[in-house]
Amino acid sequence: MNGEAPTGVGLGLRLPFLGEAAARDLDVPFWEIAPENVIGGGGAEADLIRRALARRPVISHGLSLGVGGFDPLDGTYLDQLGAFLEATGSPWHSEHLCFTAVDGATTLDLLPMPFTRDSARHAAARSRALRAALPVPLLLENITYYGELGHADLTEAQFLAEVLEGADVGWLLDVNNVYVNALNFGFDPFRWLEAMPLDRVAQMHVAGHHTWEGLVVDTHGAPVPLPVVDLMAFALARIGRPVPVLLERDNHIPPLPELLAERARLQEAYDQALAATA
């Protein structure tokens, strides 16, 4: 790995507190950053990002290389991404298990793939190609989806497991996404996790969500609810080792002291879950 993997509960580096993160060393074990927000950037904002990233370990989390798509991988961007990963010391790079562009047009969303064996083989092959192009290991993240995806050969769990095993990559387990899908589609998220290859988990995400007219939507715009904290602790206990957990907050970002207080509460739950495995 490029850099040593951090542990504990970290934060995504966001614009509302970027100046403070650049100016002083905040009590955050690591920053997660989307390289699309840094590569090729210049000016005062890019300088603040680089100063903040120099203070703490960095984990790279991509938004645009959807492994479910059919557009050719952008070799120029991959070269830039590789240089970014080397410069920041990120221990890995993660992408979403979805597609994000069609015929060169970006969808501006994370669109799910059909749960079929052909789709799983395609995603695994694309992931192997992406993994080979990067100087660090690749992780894939499970996403939310909000409707049936046509005729399915596999369940979501089977599809995800087939891609992870077929590509031989790590898993960024988004706990909130599991919980949101469980609420929308009526399954037990704890039993779902028990059936998954948790040995492949290298990182986790937790976040909040909202409900509109009976549909639960992953918004990253609310505090992490207790059931998601419990599911995080459950996963940590079964993984049996510390992995970095990211508190995602992308909308309705509270003042920094409030966000740091939530991070500290999650850190306490994180520490308790790992202590129970000792």
Image (cartoon, rainbow, N blue to C red):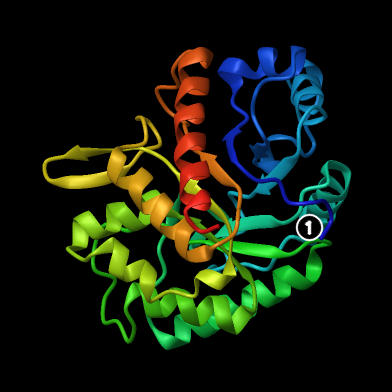
The residue at 38%/67% (across/down) is: 193
Vertical side of 278 occupied by 247: above or below: above
Picture quarter with the N terminus: bottom right
Q: In the image, is 117 to the left or to the right of 188?
A: right
Q: Foreground residue, 259 or 177?
A: 259
Location of residue 251 by image quarter: top left
87 lies left or right of 243: right
Give the residue displayed 35% in from the left and 58% down from the top: 178
At which x and y percent is residue 108? 48, 46
Q: Which residue is mark 1?
A: 78
Q: Residue at x 41, y 40 (%)?
A: 207
Q: Where does residue 182 sit, x and y in percent of width and height?
A: 25, 59
How many other residues sit within 10 Å of disc 1, few (<14), some (14-19) or many (≥20)? some
Number of numbered discs on residues: 1
Residue 270 visible? The answer is: yes
Task: Give the image quarter of residue 214.
Answer: top left
Residue 85 rendering spot, x and y as whole percentages: 81, 49
Percent across and percent down for residue 16 are 56, 16
Q: Nearer the viewer, residue 270 or 224?
A: 270
Is there any visible trace of residue 102 in the rendered image? no
Badge 1 element: helix
> On screen, 251 above or below 217?
above
For this view, does 185 lie left or right of residue 78?
A: left
Residue nearer the viewer, 102 or 222: 222
Residue placed furthest toward the left: 213
Which of the image's four quarters has the C terminus? bottom right
Q: Amino acid at mark 1?
A: Leu
Residue at 45 percent across and 26 percent down: it is 262
